[in-house]
Image (cartoon, grey):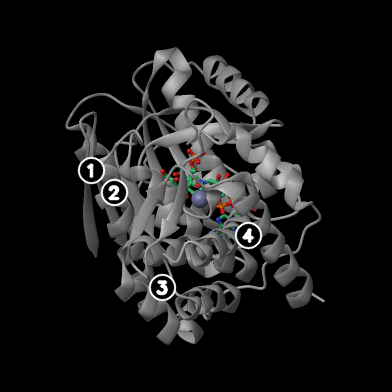
Amino acid sequence: MSVIPVKTPSATYDVTIASGLLRTLRPRLEKLNQGKPFVPFVVTSPEIWGLWSEQFLASFKEPPAVLFLPAGERYKRMASVEDLAQQLAEAGADRDSLLIAFGGGVIGDLTGFLAAIYMRGIRYVQVPTTLLAQVDSSIGGKTGANLAAGKNLIGSFHHPQAVLADTDVLGTLPATELRAGLQESIKAGIIRDAKLFSYMEKNASAILAAEPKAITHVVAASVRVKADVVSKDEKESGLRMILNFGHTIGHAIEAATNYKQLLHGEAVGWGSIAALNVAVGRKTVTPAQAERMTNLILRYGPLSPFKATAQKLVDLTARDKKNRSGVRSFILPKGIGATQIVRDVTEAELLAATEKMLTLMRQSTR
Ligand SMILES: NC(=O)c1ccc[n+]([C@@H]2O[C@H](COP(=O)([O-])OP(=O)(O)OC[C@H]3O[C@@H](n4cnc5c(N)ncnc54)[C@H](O)[C@@H]3O)[C@@H](O)[C@H]2O)c1
Ligand SMILES: O=C(O)C(=O)C[C@@H](O)[C@H](O)[C@H](O)COP(=O)(O)O
Ligand SMILES: [Zn+2]
């Protein structure tokens, strides 16, 4: 079992990673709430509940109420939050209610947002069921929903009371979801952990085959990167922006394709390749290093192709949340395992880097 703390000015909590956690949920929630009353409400999808409800319910004497959200990024929108809030109200949820986000990043982000705004804020716990949610989205308190205008444009910082990541649940995760989630672990390696990057290079077959030892290693190492960064800069005033490596163009790809064609991790993979092209132009990485990183991203693919022009994608970056007074912040790797934040990337540079990524996409998916 790994227990990794997150310590921020507004919340301190642990990320627990282990096999068999689901079966011990209820006593863990009791311990977290230290005798204070709490009434659990689970938010999940019918598919996940169908697969894992028996293990989830094993430690509950009284089964908790369950609210369902259909699977898919397109449901990560305000209408879903309103619908879930209405269901909570009708079920009698109050400020002693505790939401349990039992799902991937979509359920985690939406449930966290619901917890942030329902009755002006209630407690919640993350029980992530995708690789992506275990390595990234369940940690750090970024919650929210998409707008047609852009990714995660509404939301709030609201931390969970705990993150309980049971690695057993990854056993039913489709391979495409596993691969997409691993793009966030590659990101963690590129920005801050050269050892994780090398581990993912050397152990790609075992990781992609979801061998428990290899997967658990990747999950714990990725969580350490995220927990450390969030603990140092809770609200993304500086350092935390590095977790957005690959996301400037990645989020633009998701918005340009109406959140329907690619998984988030896949969009981040393409966005990371575009960012690496900028980095080569600026000599913050050598061509050989960029090739190594690009190869690893593609090794964990295939990344779904998509249709969008470089100009459209660059236009969409105008709504990136890292922009301030119209000035772009852009995350560039410095070699492998370190990063820098730059504020002078030009539209022309970004266009050329995105065009180059699109050319690679056309070649590699032909
Ligand atoms: N808050 C953050 O810091 C943060 C970080 C990274 C990503 N995100 C967000 O996370 C979202 C992507 O999350 P995701 O990749 O987990 O996708 P997702 O939540 O859409 O889940 C992917 C699919 O896997 C299915 N699934 C989930 N667990 C399963 C299991 N154990 N077995 C079988 N099927 C299972 C789901 O039903 C769904 O169809 C995006 O919206 C992204 O913006 C947020
Ligand atoms: O936690 C963060 O900070 C991240 O940037 C992690 C990202 O992987 C994640 O996709 C996040 O939701 C992006 O946030 P946003 O602020 O760019 O919407
Ligand atoms: Zn992400």
The residue that disc 2 covers is 229
Taking depth in this image into account, of 310 and 80 the one nearest to the observer is 310
Residue 338 is situated, as x and y percent measured from the top left of the image, at 32, 62
Name the residue type under label 4. Answer: Ala
Q: Amino acid at mark 1?
A: Lys
Is 80 placed left or right of 205 in the picture? right
In front: label 4 or label 1: 4
How far separated are the C-alphas under marks 2 and 1? 5 Å
Q: Is mark 2 within 8 Å of ligand 2?
A: yes
Tell me what residue is drawn at x 65 percent, y 45 percent.
252
Q: Which residue is mark 3?
A: 215
Residue 49's disc is none
What residue type is disc 3 on? Ile
Disc 4 or 1, which lies upstream in sequence? 1
* Residue 72 visible, this orientation: no
The foreground one among 38 and 123 is 123
Q: Which mark is residue 232?
A: 1
**Distance Cα–Cα, label 4 vs label 1:** 31 Å
Q: Position of residue 98 (x, y in %)?
A: 38, 29
Residue 247: x and y, percent? 54, 49
* Mark 2 and mark 3 residues within 8 Å of each other at the beta carbon: no
- How far apart in space, not on screen, are marks 3 and 1 (Cα)? 26 Å
Q: Which mark is residue 353?
A: 4
Asked whether mark 3 lies closer than 8 Å to ligand 1, one says no
254 with respect to 341 (left or right): right
The amino acid sitting under disc 2 is Val
Foreground mark, 2 or 3, reads 2
Is residue 54 in view? yes
Q: Are marks 2 and 1 in contact (CB under 8 Å)?
A: yes
